[in-house]
């Protein structure tokens, strides 16, 4: 929801000025964002929370920058889009793994729920997108989910900096992600029924 409401202002003020000066390709920025996320996950596991939080913020910023650079310099491509989505999911996965490794015994169930909810949410996005395209639902627009990438990063950073609250935050994260998936599937089913009336 934060992405949907504030991304325009954020990109205009904090991302576009950097994109105009940037000489790196969008795909290079995507890879740098992935590397930042991987090192952040390592820092989480090593109990270096401030480095982990800063690197995760950098990864998120680079994820915003690569898309703006791609559009600004007309570098947009299907290959770049696939790379970006894959790297985004990899960062989220390794960050959750890093959070688990802080205390595997105590955090196993909560981390499993986070990963499972994320898996179901990604599945809901993929299958509804596939069948929406096949059915040519050009007027079908999903409402913003409760959990987008910005909200996920907020949860991750709070989990990193406040380890005592991990379990409660993990259950809240999992619930919101799962609810987002259910909303997406519900919207698709509702629109499909309307289109067949």
Image: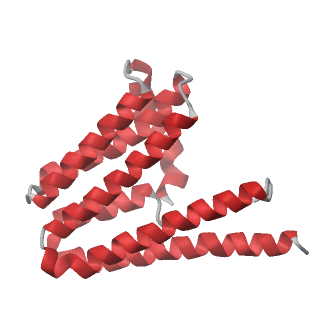
Q: Is residue 54 visible?
A: no
State the image coordinates of residue 186 (x, y, percent, origin top left).
66, 76
Name which quarter of the figure residue 169 lies in.
bottom left
Colouring mode (rainbow / by chain / secondary structure / one colour): secondary structure
Q: Position of residue 132 (x, y in %)?
A: 72, 59
Give the residue drawn at x 57%, y 67%: 124
Question: 11 or 88: nearer the eye?
Answer: 88
> Looking at the image, is 88 positioned above or below residue 160?
above
Q: Observer-nearest residue: 168 or 84?
A: 84
Compared with 166, 129 (above or below) is above
Find residue 109 and report its horizontal and vertical position in percent. Answer: 26, 81
> Residue at horizontal 35%, vertical 41%?
61
Image-based side of 190 in relation to 67, left or right: right
As displayed, is residue 114 above or below residue 144?
A: below
Left or right relative to 79: residue 97: left
Residue 128, by quadrant, is bottom right
Residue 75 can be seen in this image: yes
Looking at the image, residue 103 sits to the left or right of residue 14; the answer is left
Is residue 126 positioned above or below 73 on the image? below
Q: How many marks?
A: 0
> From the viewer's perspective, is 31 left or right of 138?
left
Quarter of the C terminus within the rendering = bottom right
Residue drawn at x 32%, y 52% is 91
Q: Camera-side residue: 145 or 27?
A: 27
Residue 170 position, x and y percent, is 30, 75
Q: Determine the image quadrant of residue 125.
A: bottom right
Give the residue displayed 43% in from the left and 40% down from the top: 64
């Amino acid at each position: 929801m934060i992405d949907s409401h504030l991304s325009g202002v954020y990109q205009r003020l904090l991302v576009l000025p950097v994109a105009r000066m940037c000489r790196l390709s969008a795909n290079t920025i995507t890879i740098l964002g992935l590397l930042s996320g991987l090192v952040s996950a390592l820092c989480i596991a090593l109990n270096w929370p401030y480095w982990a939080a800063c690197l995760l913020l950098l990864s998120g910023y680079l994820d915003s920058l690569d898309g703006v650079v791609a559009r600004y310099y007309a570098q947009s491509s299907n290959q770049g889009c696939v790379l970006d989505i894959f790297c985004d999911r990899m960062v989220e996965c390794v960050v959750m793994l890093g959070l688990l490794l802080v205390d595997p015994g105590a955090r196993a169930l909560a981390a499993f729920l986070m990963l499972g909810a994320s898996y179901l949410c990604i599945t809901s996005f993929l299958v509804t997108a596939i069948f929406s395209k096949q059915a040519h639902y050009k007027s079908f627009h999903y409402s913003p989910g409760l959990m987008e990438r910005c909200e996920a990063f907020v949860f991750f950073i709070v989990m990193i900096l406040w380890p005592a609250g991990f379990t409660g935050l993990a259950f809240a994260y999992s619930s919101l992600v799962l609810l987002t998936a259910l909303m997406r599937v519900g919207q698709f089913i509702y629109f499909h029924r309307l289109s067949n009336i």
